[in-house]
């Protein structure tokens, strides 16, 4: 690894690490993604395989799949999204706390795949903001891991603390 990737220009003195708060928050977020799997079709099998020991999704801090939207920050939409299921997918996404990200896994989740019918949503990006698209029918687990790395790169480049509005100081009441 290069020196700039390890500590984000941090300075180590003894047992103390000096770094920017924004860099630390970015590192925490990108290395502790908690996925909410939305396995809707055959891509879900490949998603399950990515969690197995052969592909080891735990090296990205994402080994604990959360089946509760209130404990997740990453939704992985794996498979065909029908209009009937789209409302449930959107509702679950809305229940996730901020910040949250979305991966569209497979051709069906990205573009509707081979299903050009009235019942299939032609891409989950019509109802959710997608951060990473993973192509394939179904994509291999390695492709999902590549998607994780791309998402981690995106998260590390996002400003976190700089855009936050400062907390309003409480006004003292003088009587």
Image (tube, helix red, strand yellow):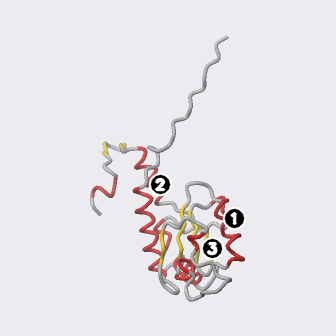
Residue 147 percent location from the top left of the image: 45, 72
Question: Which circle, 1 or 3, is nearer the viewer?
Answer: 1
Which residue is at 45% across, 79% downward? Answer: 143
Q: Residues within 10 Å of mark 2 (few under 14, many from 20)?
A: few
Q: CA distance from mark 1 to mark 2?
A: 27 Å
Residue 128 numbered mark, or none: none
Q: Is residue 116 left or right of residue 145?
A: right
Residue ID for mark 2: 28
Residue 38 numbered mark, or none: 3
Residue 153 percent location from the top left of the image: 40, 63
Q: Quadrant of the C terminus?
A: top right
Residue 87 percent location from the top left of the image: 70, 70
Q: Nearer the viewer, residue 88 or 70?
A: 88
Residue found at the very far left of the displayed protein: 2
Query: Vertically, is 139 above or below 24?
Result: below
Residue 138 percent location from the top left of the image: 52, 86
Question: Which circle, 1 or 2, is nearer the viewer?
Answer: 1
Query: Vertically, is 49 above or below 37?
Result: below
């Amino acid at each position: 690894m290069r020196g700039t990737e390890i500590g984000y220009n941090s300075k180590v003195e003894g047992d103390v690490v000096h770094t920017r708060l924004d860099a630390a928050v970015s590192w925490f977020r990108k290395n502790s993604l908690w996925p909410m799997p939305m396995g809707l079709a055959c891509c879900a099998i490949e998603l399950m395989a990515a969690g197995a020991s052969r592909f080891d999704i735990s090296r990205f801090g994402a080994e604990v799949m959360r089946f509760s939207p209130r404990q997740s920050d990453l939704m992985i939409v794996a498979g065909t999204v029908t209009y009937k299921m789209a409302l449930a997918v959107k509702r679950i996404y809305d229940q996730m706390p901020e910040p949250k990200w979305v991966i569209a896994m497979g051709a069906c989740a990205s573009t509707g795949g081979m299903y050009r019918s009235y019942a299939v949503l032609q891409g989950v990006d019509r109802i959710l903001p997608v951060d990473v698209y993973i192509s394939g029918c179904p994509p291999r687990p390695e492709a999902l891991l590549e998607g994780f790395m791309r998402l981690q790169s995106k998260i590390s480049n996002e400003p976190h603390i700089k855009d936050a509005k400062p907390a309003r100081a409480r006004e003292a009441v003088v009587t």
